[in-house]
Amino acid sequence: MQRFGMTIPFDHVPLPDQREWIQELESLGYTDVWSSEANAYDAFTPLALASVWAPTLRLGTAIVPAYTRGPACLTQQVASMAAAAPGRFVFGIGTSSDVIVEKWNGLEFDEPYRRTRDTVRFLRSALTGEKTSGEFEGFSSNGFRLGVPVPGGSVPILVAALREGMLRLAGREADGAIVNWLSAEDVARVAPIVKAFGPDKEVVARIFVAPTQDRDTVMNFGKLAIAAYLNVPVYAAFHEWMGRGEVLADMWAHWKAGDRAAALAAIPDSVVDELIVWGPPEKCREQIQRYVDNGVTTPALALLPFGYDQRQAIRDLAPR
């Protein structure tokens, strides 16, 4: 079965008003909805609503940071979602970034690989109902026992991954990976690292989409979105690894110097074309299929709010 997902909640639509939107996703043949967590809604509440509004959709977090909740609290939230939507919840976890963890939440962004690895290990154990006891990277838990049985005894866990170490972790200790801000061609390099640990490993890709032919808007707003992410150290390192170090060097230099306008101007149009799927809906659909052909098992579309009708976009991009 080919999965086909959408990122929720939708921008600029009040959360209580999204019920019909999410129900329509179900009727249009979308199989999944995926939430995120940065500076707007938390990752769990929109999925809890969707679990009732659209009872056949699979629900996933892409992603919840490994740092921002205590281990027992995180286990409770994962178990609660699994109980609300038996067999339909997938938990995506990742390092997040130093901006979110350190600057926004006042926590130390230490040993991100180990913190994510140990949180996955802790959840695997705690979700079975075993009593926790131990010191982990950056946290400890002693004597906690989950009081809510998890349907089926486990929850699929995916790890947000950019470079090789996290991609291998996602394949080795989790059920797959969640990837982000990459081109369809990049997938051909990334996906095999995960799938080397088993053909059933899942690769979820958040694909940024703008089904519009307004090139100027896509370039202007697309460069704003790219600059906001690719200047974060973890994303900068990823794109250096993917071979974009030379084409993005001027953007990084201007950004570090505090010249935001020059940084935006330094982003080549070609990078926008690689990282954002845009154009007429049929062209967008063809580009999304390239991600699948190169190894993505679950595309999770993220509609960029570039002035088009988002409600019509979910119809135009629906699986056929």
Image: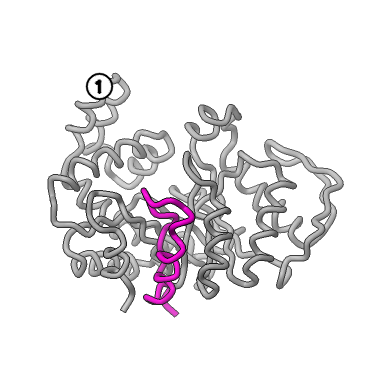
Q: How is the image coloured?
A: one colour
Can residue 14 be found in the magenta stretch? yes
Can residue 305 be found in the magenta stretch? no
Which residue is label 1 attached to?
A: 259
Near mark 1 (Cα within 10 A), the count class, few <14, some 14-19 or many ≥20, is few
Residue 106 lies left or right of residue 259; in this view the side is: right
Tell me which corner region of the image, top left, top right, bottom left or bottom right, holds residue 210. bottom left
Q: Which residues are magenta?
A: 1-30
Q: Nearer the viewer, residue 226 or 55?
A: 55
- Residue drawn where x is 21% and y is 27% of the image: 261
Residue 208 lies left or right of residue 20; in this view the side is: left
Residue 14, given in percent of the width and then of the height, sits at: 43, 51
* Residue 45 seen in render: yes
In the depicted structure, whether residue 244 falls above or below residue 93: above
Furthest-front residue in this view? 17
- Residue drawn where x is 67% and y is 47% of the image: 118
- Residue drawn where x is 20% and y is 37% of the image: 267
In the depicted structure, whether residue 208 falls above or below residue 240: below
> In what quadrant of the picture does the C terminus appear?
bottom left
In the depicted structure, whether residue 199 falls above or below residue 129: below
Which element is circle 1 on? Answer: loop
> In what quadrant of the picture does the N terminus appear?
bottom left
In the depicted structure, whether residue 259 falls above or below residue 239: above
Q: Amino acid at mark 1?
A: Asp
Q: Nearer the viewer, residue 206 or 125?
A: 206
* Residue 170 seen in render: no
